[in-house]
Image (cartoon, grey):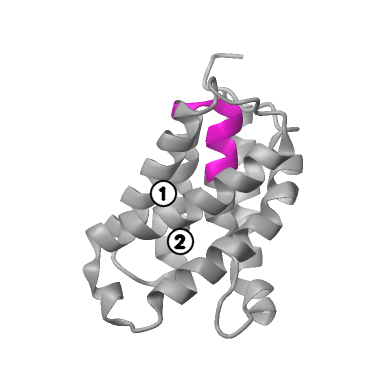
Amino acid sequence: MMRSIALLVLLLSLTAALQVSLFPRLAVHGVQPDLLLVCVIVAGLLYGPPIGATVGFVAGWFTFALQGALPGSFLASRIAMGYLSGLLESRLFKENIQIHIGAVFLGSMLATGLFLLIDPDLIRQPDWPQTALYTALYNTAFSPLAYFLLSRLPLSLEKE
């Protein structure tokens, strides 16, 4: 179990480092991918609700720390997305990459919706629907990479 947690924290730390260092350079019209959210959704689909929610918790803290905002909206939206995508784990053919691509797009849109419910100040930005759509599309482009990396990790909350 400790090895799984260490691998998970290492992967999310590297992802957070990419989020801060490389991804701002990949921004198109101010929109950049949210690879931490992609990892949350893919981990939930691959490993179920407990792992999805755990990854969501860690990713929510990283996101909040990187953006310097209040932690509540990031934590709640990421934990919810990890748990909700985990509920689909036993209902979908999770080895199919197209399932992950579609789930990342829909999950990114849903995460924005959950974030808006918790922090409605985002609605005051006139271009938030367009930004949410572009971010979801950008996230979708990174879903095969996240699937490839996360599907090879021996993540489990069981004792080893």
Q: Amino acid at mark 2?
A: Thr
Q: Whole-percent x and y of residue 103?
A: 56, 44
Q: Residue at x 55, y 55 (%)?
A: 36
Q: Which stretch appears magenta? A: 41-49
Looking at the image, residue 145 sits to the left or right of residue 72; the answer is right
For label 1, the crowd category at 10 Å Cα-Cα, with few meaning under 14, some 14 to 19 and many 20 or more, is many
Q: Amino acid at mark 1?
A: Arg
Looking at the image, residue 128 sits to the left or right of residue 16; the answer is left
Q: Whole-percent x and y of residue 46?
A: 61, 30
Q: Which mark's residue is nearer the viewer, 2 or 1?
A: 1
Looking at the image, residue 72 sits to the left or right of residue 1; the answer is left
Q: Residue at x 58, y 37 (%)?
A: 43
Looking at the image, residue 90 sits to the left or right of residue 140; the answer is left
Look at the picture and state if 145 lies above or below 89. below
Q: Which mark is residue 63?
A: 2
| First reached walking from the N terminus: tag 2 or tag 1 | 2
Is residue 139 inside the magenta stretch? no
Label 1: which residue? 78
Q: Are marks 2 and 1 in contact (CB under 8 Å)?
A: yes
Q: Whole-percent x and y of residue 63?
A: 45, 61
